[in-house]
Amino acid sequence: MIAFLIQRLWHAFLVMFVISLISFSIKGSLGDPVRELVGQSVSVEQRNLLREEMGLNDPLPVQYGRFAWDALHGDLGQSYFYSKPTLDVIVEHMPATLELVLCASLIILLFSVPVGVYAAIRPASWLAKTCMGISVVGISVPVFLTAIVLIQLFSIGVHITPFPTDTDWGTWLNELISTDGGLPSFGRGNELVHLFGTWDTGFFSVDGLLHLLLPAASLASIMLPLFIRLIRSEMLEVLQSDYVRFARAKGISPGRIYFLHALKNTMLPVITVGGVQIGTMVAYTILTETVFQWPGMGLMFLEAITRSDIPLIVAYLMVVGLIFVVTNTLVDLVYGLVNPTVKLTGQHA
Amino acid sequence: MSEETSTADLRAQMPGAWARFRKSYLLYSFKRDPVAQLCLLIFIIITIAAFGAPWWAPTDPYDLTGIDIMNSELPPMWLDGGDAAFPLGTDAQGRDLLSTILYGTRVSLLIGFGAVAMQCVLGILFGLLAGYFGGIIDATLMRLADIQLSFSTLMVAILVGAIVKASFGNLMFGQVALILLILIIGIAEWPQIARTVRASVLAERSKEYVDAARVMGFRAPRIMFRHLLPNTLSPIFVIATVQIANAIISEAALSFLGLGMPETQPSLGSLIKSGFDYIQSGAWWITLIPGAVLVVLVLVINLLGDWLRDVMNPRLHKG
Amino acid sequence: MALLDVRQLDVRFSSRGKAVQALRGIDFSLERGERLGIVGESGAGKSVAAFSILNLIAHPGFIAGGEITFDGHHLNRMSERQLRKIRGDRIAMIFQDPMMTLNPVLTLGAQMIECLKAHRRISTREARQIALDKLNLVQIPSPERRLDQYPHELSGGMRQRIIIAIALLLDPDLIIADEPTTALDVTIQAEIMALLTELCDTQNVALMLITHDLGVVSQVTRRTLVMYAGRIIEQGPTREIINDPQHPYTQGLLDALPQMATPGERLNQIPGAMPSLNNIPPGCAFNPRCTFATERCTREVPHFVSTGGTQVACHMVEAMLAKEKAHDTV
């Protein structure tokens, strides 16, 4: 277990090193910090003096050392636009994104396991086939399009009248297939509850939760089908294994076979893939937050791009990289705890 | 490995290959799967419609002189206020939506196929190198692939897109956006294919025929491309199909974020983006019709990919 | 009455929309405490026969016809729920590969105790005690510790002992063992086989042993069936089949044993290979590989004829017998 832990931590360190190298080179090659500081009007001599002072003429390894040292001490530079430390800007925007991701993860967790397991146990049933059909469509709809459709349906509302409006049944059917809209589709609302520090939460007010509804559903819509498909195919494979057949030969009840013998083995690869998917989720927050003008890190990042706020872009890259590395390492550790074959060997068996 | 012998080989194989294809399980299950048939049909129709756009699109959306701003935001012809000259309505600049969608689909398909070609080149090259040589080359390449994958391909594409756009500037980026997007998505998504190639190479490398080839004095590139690569083709084929769908979605996402095709040369993604600004005013068609086309296109490719995977890996039965 | 009686068992696999026959109507029976061997090359249908008794054939296989009677119960007419009461309790199974048979994420104790609890209303403590007893029976060192271990912590031979212990947990009447030693090291094979035989003897359990190894069969079983392409082609007392095989296929199998070969020469392999299920030749399925095949063999399916102790389905043997008979009467 200790060897396993050290190996994982070494991996994490390596990844962070690569990310910091990339960030450093972006910072160095894009945008001239001197010009950003003083503008065009300053003479060449003065500018060179400033460069010398800021250490921009030092050899690259020295500059990188300084960059890494500062980063380790929580200093990722000043944002051009906000004129304050980039880390502060990111921390301000973080709670909104975290709440969104948390909500979406809950939705995914709640639905993917039962649907995936059911589709594997009864692959021929019409319900399973319907679910799998919907999931194929689900992974084919880009997340921003889902978001737009949800806005059209539940925020703007859809009123169509394919049935005659002058009859009772027609009106009833028309209303059945029309939606009222009215759900908020913009921002987090005004009724946020202050938790601590920069964390204002939308979890404790109806308005806050309503605002969360559409963005979280959009974000979940892309990952949910992926997880359903993954759980189903892993479970199908496990159900064909010898140990499941042996459990049946022992006369164990189907419930116990499905939910203990098979599910536990199914979840092992799902945990690993789930960890990787966290990265995808962060990427999708950028899209979701753009559509819903959700004031989180993703929207902040996109605005930083349009404003060419290089330090903020670099800081975002570093922070997101750190989030990935931490979650991946955690996922690996959880995998090691759940999978008995990892403990002794120190590697995946 | 002279040119003549290889083409002669190929010609000698041709009838055999065709006969084998006719008897293959691939064709057999295709004939029995109406979903796969329908998907291929729709895909072919969309592709022909898109690439033939200059011949049958009602107007040329790239030609600014043919556009009248007075025609902006007209609804599709079956709604009140629609105009038969614009079957699917017009966008905010007065461009005929049908023509714009046809041209936009062409751009999306070009980028999709280009990006997959790009990632195949990178993925096959890196995968072969990593699998064949092992050691430090393998470790470096695969660690890089791990990092990229843990960031997710979309994230990498967004980051690379952001950096490229920042360094090119808006105007320059717009002019070469098509090429740049192919490069960006290709760079972002090579690890998938590289991993598959590497895994197959590792499985094949231990087999005797590779040793035999090495003992006979064949050089590494020949062993890699003539002996190892053919064995990895069928998994690459399956993955590449799904990757086309992914590349099209990635391009749409980048365009939607403003990191992709400019509005003067729209792809499906940038059409959806430009329409999104008008959805609150009720002009849903500008964004939802291209959206529907995008979904159908991606869906049929995904379904074909699923079908291929099931056929080529029959162990995972659909049940 | 026989403990297990199988009549005209017909098992098919659906593939590409067609059903191919894996078992083409086989008959056999097994007495209490008897040990029966089923022999044949891979693909002969031995494992299918083993798994179909408890209706555990993997999808897309299914029992298309026939009758399986176990101690008065018609197994093939039972519901899944009724059948579950028989599985593990009255009939236990031992699988081929001990590395794949145990669930990797559950402790050995959990996998033993769940089996007891599925069939008996007993406390975990009692179940644990029974599990320990059985582990002692299969001579596992420090059984107390094993219960909390995971399968991967044990060697293949140890795992197969555990699996035998699981099979014995509920004192079954019949154990069906599908190639129980093929996946093990040669040195351990004999050990495990001896253990299994001894336990079946002392516990008075009937054993149905599926194997391709005639050597194993000769040491363990009293009666043997030889299968080829979904049919039984020769059956009888093991000793007679080994000493005086009648069917050309059985002769070929015995000739192919390493101890039958002259040192320095090649093994006497049967030419050709077992036909695939969807391409079984008409008549006697063995005819393309048989050196004695006549035109009749390609046309007519041979029926069983008795030659002393054994029964053989072969036209050549039948003709020889007829000739002898004619000779005798003359």
Image: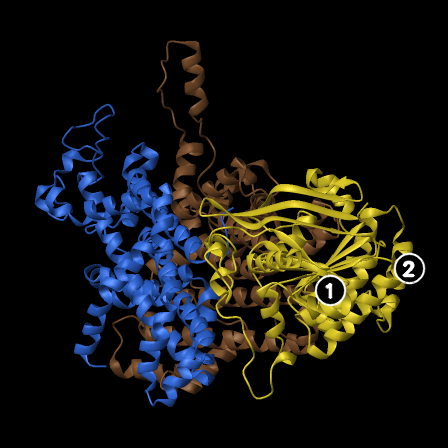
The residue drawn where x is 42% and y is 25% is A178
- Residue A312: x percent and y percent? 42, 65
Q: Specify the quadrant that holds the C terminus of chain C.
A: bottom right
Question: Tell me, what hue is chain B?
Answer: blue
In this view of the protein, which residue sits in the foreground, C34 or B307?
A: C34
Q: Could you tell me residue C262's position as x and y percent? A: 60, 84
Q: Under tag 2, what secondary structure?
A: helix
For disc 1, the neighbor class at 10 Å (few under 14, some 14 to 19, many from 20) is: many
Is residue C228 shown to the viewer in this render?
A: yes
Residue annotated with mark 2: C129
Q: CA distance from mark 1 to mark 2?
A: 38 Å
Give the amino acid at mark 1.
Answer: Thr
- Residue at image position (46%, 41%) is A134
Q: The N terminus of chain C lies in which quarter of the figure?
A: top right
Q: Amino acid at mark 2?
A: Gln
Residue at mark 1: C238
Q: Residue at x 53, y 70 (%)?
A: C270
Same-chain check, marks 1 and 2 = yes
Instruction: Give the colour scheme shown.
Output: by chain
Chain in brown colour: A
Where residue C129 sits: x, y (%)?
91, 59
